[in-house]
Amino acid sequence: MRGKLYLVATPIGNLEDISIRAIKTLKEVDLILCEDTRTSGILLSHYGVKNPIVSYHSHNEDERIPQIIKLLNEGKNIALISDGGTPCISDPGSKLVRACVENDITVVPIPGPNAIIPSIVLSGFKIKDFYFEGFIPQKKGRKTKLEEIARRKSMTVFYESPYRILKLLEELNSICPDREIAFCRELTKKFEEVIRGTVRDIYAMRHRLKLKGEFTVVVGYK
């Protein structure tokens, strides 16, 4: 009998944000694929998960996939986790899922945390529909993508590095200064913070912003 691949969502910050089913799955599988074994090791140790772990990230996935498919075909059950949140959402995993589909191997999602939905509900904006952009381009195509977001009437959600937040504010202030925006920082962690206002207002206070941690940006409706 073939094994199954489990896509297990893990906490984005607070270690208590994990489902009973996720913990049970991680304890029962034969192998756990981790984006960073050191980061995931903290979570696994916290919940007493002692199963074997192997690194699986964007730099080695092409090499790993044939090995993983072979193990699954031999009947091994395998879980994939990222450093935090749901695998495949701006994290490695999609190629592996595709390979499983092509090899008729069952993929089972174990739903749970991600930064997208909490950011949307914390924004305070009326929620109708939204676009998710993942990480927007750092250089090539960045201006075009931001102009596209500014023209869009719907809500847009994307991730941004704390090192580029000031640059992002400057760019948006030149494109859509009156657009409402929310910056969600360090969600579920001790220093969780949400900054809301127009782009112009937040740009004016940019030097007072705390530029640490992960940022999820929500651009409101036009």
Image (tube, helix red, strand yellow):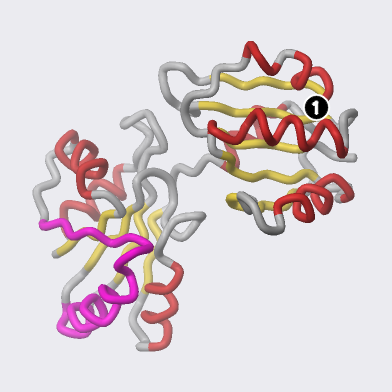
Q: Who is closer to the viewer here, 35 or 127?
A: 35
- In the image, taking residue 153 as reference, residue 155 lies left or right, namely left
Question: Is residue 114 magenta-colored?
Answer: no
Q: Who is closer to the viewer here, 19 or 66?
A: 66
Secondary element under disc 1, as helix, strand or loop, is: helix
Q: Give me the residue at 19% from left, 42% from top.
A: 41
Q: Give me the residue at 86% from left, 32% from top.
A: 179
Position of the C terminus by quadrant: top right
- In the image, taking residue 11 as reference, residue 215 lies left or right, namely right
Would you place residue 20 above or below residue 190 in this image?
below
Please report the bounds of the magenta region as a residue range.
Answer: 52-75
Q: Position of residue 57 (x, y in %)?
A: 33, 60
Would you place residue 61 above or below residue 16 in this image?
below
User: What is the residue that sits farthest to the front in this orientation?
Assistant: 139
User: Which residue is labeled 1 in the image?
Assistant: 199
Q: Position of residue 122 (x, y in %)?
A: 64, 28
